[in-house]
Amino acid sequence: MENRKPYGEFVAIIALLVSLTALAIDAMLPALSNMSDELGISHENDRQLIISFVFLGMAVGQFLFGPISDSLGRKSPVMVGLLLFTIGSIISAVSVNLEWMLVGRFIQGLGAAGPRTLSAAIVRDQFRGNAMARIMSLIMVVFILVPVLAPALGQGILLISHWRMIFWTFVGLSVTTSIWFWLRQPETLPPENRIPFSMAAIGTAGMEVVKHPVTRSYTLALSFVFAAFVGYLSTSQQILQELYGTGDLFAVYFSFLAFGIGCAAFVNSKLVMRFKITTLCRCALATLVVLSLLCLLFHVYRMPTLNEFMTYLIFCFFCFGILFGNLNAMAMEPMGHIAGMAAAVIGSVSTLISLFFGFFVGQAYDSTIIPLIISFALFPALALLAIHFTKAPDQSESH
């Protein structure tokens, strides 16, 4: 493609775009206790909404940015997303109560959905084959490293400044990315390849996702698995930093678990070449259920120590790393003819469902690890049921 930017610069720009979401979520976790005190949050579990509202904004944004970019091109929607992310960060930085904080966080999530959703489309517009695979691999490294490093960034800012500085850091990063992207990244979708925006087309794609047994079952399974993960994200600061007393080391423990997901994603890239995706999904889901039931039985005897609990979680997170990509791949498999629309619908639906159930997991937190462990057993079991009664996947996958 003409006017393509230098390879290294292009990867750096895309890496910044995909990093915003993880930063907006994970960098805030060490600050939740400080924010709770200053914002006057009376019920300690309400602090979890500061995380949940980013996902809510993303669910809405995913549904819109994909189809809009197919109609208007990639560059303008990304810039709108970055602008919204900046506005949301400013509102959050100056908020004086929980209500305004949640408004800012929702706008942050809405804006972050644009760069995150469209970064893959920008790569796909410009590269094919091995070149595309190489860039996506580098982006995946960033996608793995940012959740590992983001809590440390938030904790580091807290050591030298106020929690509001985390949001001002987001503003600076977003403005820098916006200027760099606008000046150096050309439009990648030519006018002749654009598709007129149509709510009817989105509705048709939504109905096809709902009606197809494979896509419907695996989207539901993905929703259940992500619900357990959202429950963890919502309560991780309370459990690790307060219940287990990790204090300033919370970022280290959180990063260790995030690294487990990254390792699993790498291992999974090898496993899918040898085993059916459906087999890997069933094994990972069954492992989550068994491990969590065993942990519950152990808890009857005594509360696990921090090291014991971390051991349990790292195995669970390895399973999550296997599941996230595979369940999404299986949900998308029959949707190749409407891939862009289907990805938007699947992403939005799975996020909304997971938020609904994940909210109740977070609100059930009672200064014990029991609600989280139950969710790690219950939701994978429901996901296993969802795909167990779907016989079509084995026929649709190529091995």
Image (cartoon, rainbow, N blue to C red):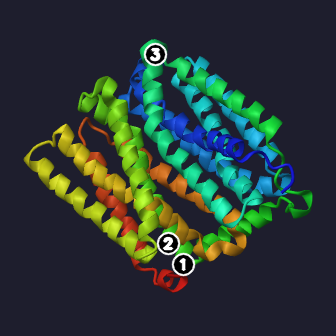
Q: Position of residue 287 (x, y in %)?
A: 28, 64
Q: Are marks 3 and 2 in contact (CB under 8 Å)?
A: no
| Amino acid marked by disc 2 | Ser
Determine the secondary structure under disc 1. Answer: helix
Q: Residues within 10 Å of mark 2 (few under 14, many from 20)?
A: many
For marks 3 and 1, the one nearer the N-term is 3
| Amino acid marked by disc 1 | Pro
Would residue 190 be found to the left or right of residue 373 on screen? right
Residue at 75 percent across and 45 percent down: it is: 6
The residue lying toward the viewer, choosing from 301 and 147, is: 147
Q: Are marks 1 and 2 in contact (CB under 8 Å)?
A: yes
In 3D space, how far apart are the residues under numbered discs 3 and 2 (Cα atoms)? 43 Å
Check disc 1 and report the residue beneath it: 213
Q: Residues within 10 Å of mark 1 (few under 14, many from 20)?
A: some
Q: Position of residue 315 (x, y in %)?
A: 29, 54
Q: Residues within 10 Å of mark 3 (few under 14, many from 20)?
A: few
In 3D space, how far apart are the residues under numbered discs 3 and 1 (Cα atoms)? 48 Å
Check disc 3 and report the residue beneath it: 38
Q: Are marks 3 and 1 in contact (CB under 8 Å)?
A: no
**Quadrant holding the N terminus:** bottom right
Residue at 51 percent across and 37 percent down: it is: 25
Label for residue 217?
2
| Amino acid marked by disc 3 | Glu
Count of numbered labels shown in the rendering: 3
The residue lying toward the viewer, choosing from 192 and 125, is: 125
Determine the secondary structure under disc 3. Answer: helix
Label for residue 334?
none
For marks 3 and 2, the one nearer the N-term is 3
